[in-house]
Image: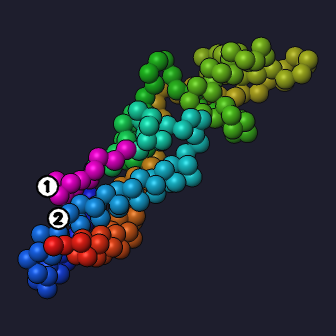
Amino acid sequence: MDLSVKSNIKEFSKNLTNVQKNQLPFATSRALNDTAIDVQNAEVKGIQVRFNNRKKWWMKRQPTGVKVSFSDKRKLWVDIYTNAKFAKIQEEGGIKTPKGRAIAIPAEGLPKRLRKAGGARKLLQSNKKAFSTPKGIFKRRGKKRYPIIQQFSYATSVTVKPRFKFHKTAEVATNRKFKRNFQKRLAEAIKTAR
């Protein structure tokens, strides 16, 4: 996913001295890095709102976390990315197929703690009244003969709607923050120019 930032840096640089112009790459790099951190924070906030997370997979120290590769004055771009395997399908949507025989789809009313990856397996392992059939996972309730409630149904594929909004979040945060970051870093660079 690529996102470019358009700016009037060339037009702005016409009014600068040669010494000040030499500071432009440094100021631009610092502004890009500041903006990358702003985008990273926006992504993390969005993930926590849009996803039902069991683990904090988005944290930058996690292998799947939202990470930043910073710029320098010779490389005037940044990369903001995640290595989470599910990111692409959650961003673009598509058909999800099972790793094994079927995908377990939670039934309505299932507790939130089980509506996560591995929830079906956890239910079967932790509850003696839960059992699996070719149609799904069910649970006995009470002592009567047929009070059985479906907890999960099985499917061979599922349509995933796009909901990550990684690119959109990055675009909004960049448009909101880059100009201000650039003005701040350029002012600092000009002040220290010799």
Q: Is residue 83 above or below residue 16?
A: above
Labelled pair 2, 1 in contact (Cβ < 8 Å):
yes
**Residue 63: percent from left, percent from top:** 41, 32
**Quarter of the rendering occupied by the C terminus:** bottom left
- Image-based side of 148 in relation to 74, left or right: right
Callout 2 secondary element: helix
Reply yes or no: does residue 70 show up in magenta: yes
Name the residue located 70 percent from the left edge and 28 percent from the top edge: 151
Residue 25 badge: 2
Report the number of numbered marks. 2
Near mark 1 (Cα within 10 A), the count class, few <14, some 14-19 or many ≥20, is few
Say whether residue 6 is visible: yes
User: Which residue is nearer to you in this view: 182 or 120?
Assistant: 182
Q: Is residue 51 above or below residue 19?
A: above
Tag 2: residue type?
Answer: Pro
Q: Quadrant of residue 119?
A: top right
The residue at which mark 1 appears reads as 74
Tag 1: residue type?
Answer: Arg
Magenta span: 67-78
Most distant residue in the front direction: 194
User: Which residue is nearer to you in this view: 182 or 172?
Assistant: 182
User: Which residue is nearer to you in this view: 119 or 41?
Assistant: 41
